[in-house]
Amino acid sequence: MSGHFGDQAPIRFAGREATEELAFRHYDPDALVLGKRMEDHLRFAVCYWHNFVWPGTDPFGGQTFERPWFGDSMEQARAKADAAFEMFELLGVPFFCFHDRDIAPEGATLAESNTNVRAIAELFARKMETARVRLLWGTANLFSNRRYMAGAATNPDPDVFAYAAAQVKNVLEVTHELGGANYVLWGGREGYETLLNTDLKRELQQLGRFLTLVVDHKHKIGFPGTILIEPKPQEPTKHQYDFDVAAVYGLLKTYGLENEVKVNIEVGHAVLAGHSFEHELALASALGILGSCDINRNDYQSGWDTDQFPNDVPEVALALYYILRAGGFTTGGLNFDAKLRRQSIEPDDLLHAHVGGMDVCARALKAAAAMLEEGSLERFVAERYAGWDAPEARKMLDGTYDLAAIADYVERAGVQPTPRSGRQEYLENLVNRFC
Amino acid sequence: MSGHFGDQAPIRFAGREATEELAFRHYDPDALVLGKRMEDHLRFAVCYWHNFVWPGTDPFGGQTFERPWFGDSMEQARAKADAAFEMFELLGVPFFCFHDRDIAPEGATLAESNTNVRAIAELFARKMETARVRLLWGTANLFSNRRYMAGAATNPDPDVFAYAAAQVKNVLEVTHELGGANYVLWGGREGYETLLNTDLKRELQQLGRFLTLVVDHKHKIGFPGTILIEPKPQEPTKHQYDFDVAAVYGLLKTYGLENEVKVNIEVGHAVLAGHSFEHELALASALGILGSCDINRNDYQSGWDTDQFPNDVPEVALALYYILRAGGFTTGGLNFDAKLRRQSIEPDDLLHAHVGGMDVCARALKAAAAMLEEGSLERFVAERYAGWDAPEARKMLDGTYDLAAIADYVERAGVQPTPRSGRQEYLENLVNRFC
Amino acid sequence: MSGHFGDQAPIRFAGREATEELAFRHYDPDALVLGKRMEDHLRFAVCYWHNFVWPGTDPFGGQTFERPWFGDSMEQARAKADAAFEMFELLGVPFFCFHDRDIAPEGATLAESNTNVRAIAELFARKMETARVRLLWGTANLFSNRRYMAGAATNPDPDVFAYAAAQVKNVLEVTHELGGANYVLWGGREGYETLLNTDLKRELQQLGRFLTLVVDHKHKIGFPGTILIEPKPQEPTKHQYDFDVAAVYGLLKTYGLENEVKVNIEVGHAVLAGHSFEHELALASALGILGSCDINRNDYQSGWDTDQFPNDVPEVALALYYILRAGGFTTGGLNFDAKLRRQSIEPDDLLHAHVGGMDVCARALKAAAAMLEEGSLERFVAERYAGWDAPEARKMLDGTYDLAAIADYVERAGVQPTPRSGRQEYLENLVNRFC
Amino acid sequence: MSGHFGDQAPIRFAGREATEELAFRHYDPDALVLGKRMEDHLRFAVCYWHNFVWPGTDPFGGQTFERPWFGDSMEQARAKADAAFEMFELLGVPFFCFHDRDIAPEGATLAESNTNVRAIAELFARKMETARVRLLWGTANLFSNRRYMAGAATNPDPDVFAYAAAQVKNVLEVTHELGGANYVLWGGREGYETLLNTDLKRELQQLGRFLTLVVDHKHKIGFPGTILIEPKPQEPTKHQYDFDVAAVYGLLKTYGLENEVKVNIEVGHAVLAGHSFEHELALASALGILGSCDINRNDYQSGWDTDQFPNDVPEVALALYYILRAGGFTTGGLNFDAKLRRQSIEPDDLLHAHVGGMDVCARALKAAAAMLEEGSLERFVAERYAGWDAPEARKMLDGTYDLAAIADYVERAGVQPTPRSGRQEYLENLVNRFC
């Protein structure tokens, strides 16, 4: 083998007692969970950006990774694609994801950049003929180049809006041609650095227009995938308009897009917004906009985006419980939008990171499925709200009773509510039995 | 004088060089700012809860304040009202606010509680005949009693929903009868402690129904005031459904209430939600739901609600700039929903706290008005977005151009956006010239 | 049975497949782990305060718990002791902990209060003759009463210092008489609300003096236990002088007490100070001041002290790994300084909470022990620093080389360090194999 | 003028009513404040790093600034020095600061790098003959190069320790030769990414040894300046050993360096550690280790280091109050370790940022001086602790009384402390009169 990962053989499921370091101890793609293959539940994706592009920099330090494909030429872009597909195959993941600027160098003009993207996309198409891997989603990088420093859709300069729109058109079409299951919009610069130079109302309208343009084009070209927005509260901006699931839902309702666009929820972004991951999932599910997940955790002691691989089985189990209850993924999946720590400079660190993350998710899936099958948790919740099936209760909810009628009922029936234990500790123990 | 504050005379404007401690150095109610009386701009309110009810407890300590009216009798409630109106007059504030449970003791039944509230409301009405003070808003306390421990509108038990609805009916009517300018809903328990025992979707529907009931009753009784929701991210709950302005707007849109309900934004709640105060104001203004403010700051180094009096002129000036730009308050105002530090045990600490807070807001108002009059800030923003007046730009926003047309335009015109400085430091300096 | 917990039988180890709700699934006191009984490793303690005194209040809500012993009489204090010992026996815990004000009502004078404490301590002594439970630590409540609102040792008023000292004397002696293994000082009010009224330098000196007085008295009365300080960054104060382990160590060094006083580390306090729990443990261990633990977790999405029961096995496992590596507890133990959620109003919620917490710690202990026995983690770390055994390296550390000599060596040897992978993801995976 | 800033004339004090944008409205270097020139109080420094090296990147975006000197050649380094000294003169600041890697390109070996640094230092020396600017401090960059990814002094590899030591030796000597007033150590990588691969105890010992080596060399070469440590809690590491002032003090005490090393406190680092800026100043002053300040603020809504120019007069005024009370700076000063927002791409944005920051500090100095001269704040604090002058109080503090003697006194004198108001709101109002 002459690959980036040397003579590493494809990584296989070997069970809990595996003796080799690089083996799946829990992730067995063909194992059935709730009657469905584990692979089809989890729909893992590997991302291009963190694995093959990011050089290991942080705000106080330079490049630590030394990858032979680093550089700006098309030849290096092809070498990068070779390494990427080598890793996809070694891991046996069903999906990958990319930004346009990850896969091909930026040209002097947008046309030239688009040509570069398309050339690599064709290379992908050829590789995908023999590889098992498919495209979970594509997206346009509307945040790295200095032209986007003040936003893309929400830029004060309409030329930037136009440039971004044209760039999205290209990547949306490429994504369609590659059979992508979704198209993602991450609004990393759709926010502001200071309100002092910002017309908030105008920028929100620009954002709404941009989303509508993308949705319309999706229908025009017949792209069957889902359009996804990835909420994040801040970083790089001081405030990002797609702050969290609730904020995105408000945006979508305002522009009549709540049936057209769903969310791609990232664990770490939820945490940075002051929410638990399961909160964002449960809320998106309740609102009907749960699409896909970036399964990278955030350090709970950091105030910035640490994009680490998942390693907490109970946390992921609870998340998967809500995903399973929502019916599981349709077009979505679990994307490792995670990066190595910058000291993890060996090629096989990439493999260890993904293998560990996939095993964590597999254990969590089994736990979540067991919780669902056993049923105590769902039963507890159902019983807690059972009073709402009573006739008087229904009348309050369905509009039969107005405020005065309810007040009459309280007086007439001498309503004196009896507090009942919320049983949180018992329920937490219950969850732990499965994790 | 035999009052709670001894022989203290009403506090007067005495200018920056005032020698007495208790004087307004900046707040001059009749001074004209942008052609309107300072009092009419700021519409200060004093709250009943923190000043006359809270005993100085914290999670680790008991009562520190010794007020003669502390207790559960109606006689003590009347003594409390005497002290409250004494303070309103000493401060010369135009407004006050209350929760039903602040002003009168809870009875054995809701009917008895309502009777107590009404009795004190009648005492208020008599006092208001001679006092200048009016009612900024009333509200029902749906969070202190153990019956509400799992929520009011969002309780799993419909009896609690009913009880809360009946309680709100009473306070809404009392507020109407007292000529209140607004009615506030703070959903302190409308959230959850753990998702494990919670049906999020159902609770959101209950909340939507409850809001609709309140709005319908407002119209039925002809209450001309505004219904306000006060966003807060968490505390006491782990997650509160009215997390921030964006979340409230999404809720209102879902239930078709975005033209019926506005927000009461609290400085400290904005901070706890990860926003600046001016962000929440600017967003509410852009969405058309800016109603009123609780002007209490939060300690930036604390993760809980500290409810302190405002003391940062530049922060309040920026806030008032956005309020003035939105046209100023209509029914809303600036409510000091702030509490003394628990070591501030002397009666006159209450006066110092309010006088200081009012002076900070007055200085900030003058600064905000000067910024507006001078105009550089507004001009800078207008010029930054001026490119959107060009014909091609308009076509992108108004729907004339679809994504393909925009991409054509980029190619045809050879669009290469030129980054322009955002000038944040210059703008921050500019603001400082006025503060 | 006529007890508070009805006819509940003592809770027994029944293994993972236990069918009854209230059984230990993992905690088997007599099971040997690394050659020592599980009970002797974990040294669980139940606290008096949260379980038997706290009424379920929060900053926005009143009492939710209804305990028959709530009240201020000595008779109620004795009934409370009965319920407490009933629970200690049901859980089979080896230890309990108390504050003086938890166990007996405050009297009109300190002498009267001390008499009350002593009377209940005598009741404890009689109960301890037949019960298995022993005292892990006692402590004086120097924070609830309004006399302590501005601090105890660090109060501007020397009378408060004196009162606190006299109160500590009593509880330290009572703790000694009851055979307590430690005495704890939690400086909840030893900090400030605002620097504006605070003489920081003076207060630090007062604190140093107070600690010295306590240590001297310990030796005078021959108390063989350990004096412990419990770090916390803030809440109730804005800043607490014993912020974290590093701050406590600095204090101890300043007053020459680093060999006399150790720390009682609380999970949640570590988190509130911006640290992981294992960080505080590892640091205390490195500094030689690791004493005991409060094993209550904090909600990672809350900025205040949530004092929840532990439920995250991997987090506790890592903590126990560092405790085992430090040689395990000597006089210390794992105290559940945790409280029920205020909606958990049933008596058996107290049992569920502790059973769940004890099982989490038992699983974590087995995982930590396995990590240690397997040894890969320790070997990895040892190898990573192995270069320091080389002669040149030793000379740098032992003072043989000064800066110039080191610079010579770099030049002479042409030192060009070779970065080596930190292997974080591999190590995280490794830990997960045991959890 | 053919400089980087075009034909900009040196910026002059023009008073509050200045009409030109680039003028000092408050900073008048020669104005006397408390009998000392404003310039001598504030001792402003401009940093090399943020102004002349940082390209405007953030974790999600590339270069935005276009400076003609960007590049790796010595010629570009000299052009950079020209621009830097041009700016120092335009601003009229008395000091500048640098890291070795800011001023000269890294060579293939340390010797070559040191030669480059020395060559530019000689250029500085020539420029300083005619310019007024002096060196506040120099420092070695021990964090950007990948060799330092796992720490410098605390690296597991002794070769890195050696390399870092040799690098510091060079910069310390260069700093001495340039007449630097201080030498700074910022331990950006002196911490860990994960405890799993870290020997905390060993790393703390390495750090102690490193500090001792530097201090010894300072004395050996006769450097009269102060050695400063700059505390920061985390970022880039997960945990940094010099977390805050308290942690640094503990370190210094452990290695007997508390009289040799002081702290350089950065506003933003204080905030990230959960402290107010004035807390860190007051604590350092109480401990006798207050050295110098980096006066860059942090966004209170961000969890990462935003390094913004100061713009809040009341915050800086309180800080300067504590600095003045500590006697003002000796070798230290106020260094603008602040960076432009990355959208501020024009050369004159650099000038606006510094002019604004200097004016904020000048206003704050005048306010702080007025607070001190008026004296109410100091008097209030002195009176609050006046009880400690009583004979019994002194005996408690000086060791005359032991715990038993104090308890006797409490009983004998019937001590019943009387709570007194902490007057926080009054004091906050008082401060606002001066700001």
Image (cartoon, coloured by chain):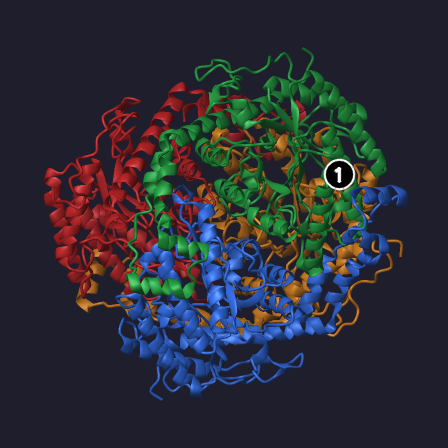
Chain colours: A red, B orange, C green, D blue
Residue C98, position as x, y percentages in the image: 69, 31
C357 or D412: nearer the viewer: D412
Find residue C141 and report its horizontal and vertical position in percent.
72, 38
Q: Quadrant of residue B24?
A: bottom right
Q: Is residue B168 above or below residue A147?
A: above
Quarter-of-image position of residue D263: bottom right
Query: Would residue B377 be found to the left or right of residue D108 on screen?
Result: right
Residue that label 1 marks: C220
Whole-percent x, y for residue D29 in the image: 56, 83
Comparing D383 with D136, the one in front is: D136
Looking at numbered disc 1 in the image, what kind of residue is underneath it? Lys
**Chain assignment, label 1:** C
Q: Please say whether residue C226 is visible from this viewpoint.
A: yes
Judge left or right: residue B100 versus residue A292: right
Can residue C435 be seen? Answer: no
Is D360 placed above or below D276 here? below
Q: Residue at x 68, y 33 (%)?
A: C224
Label 1: element kind? helix
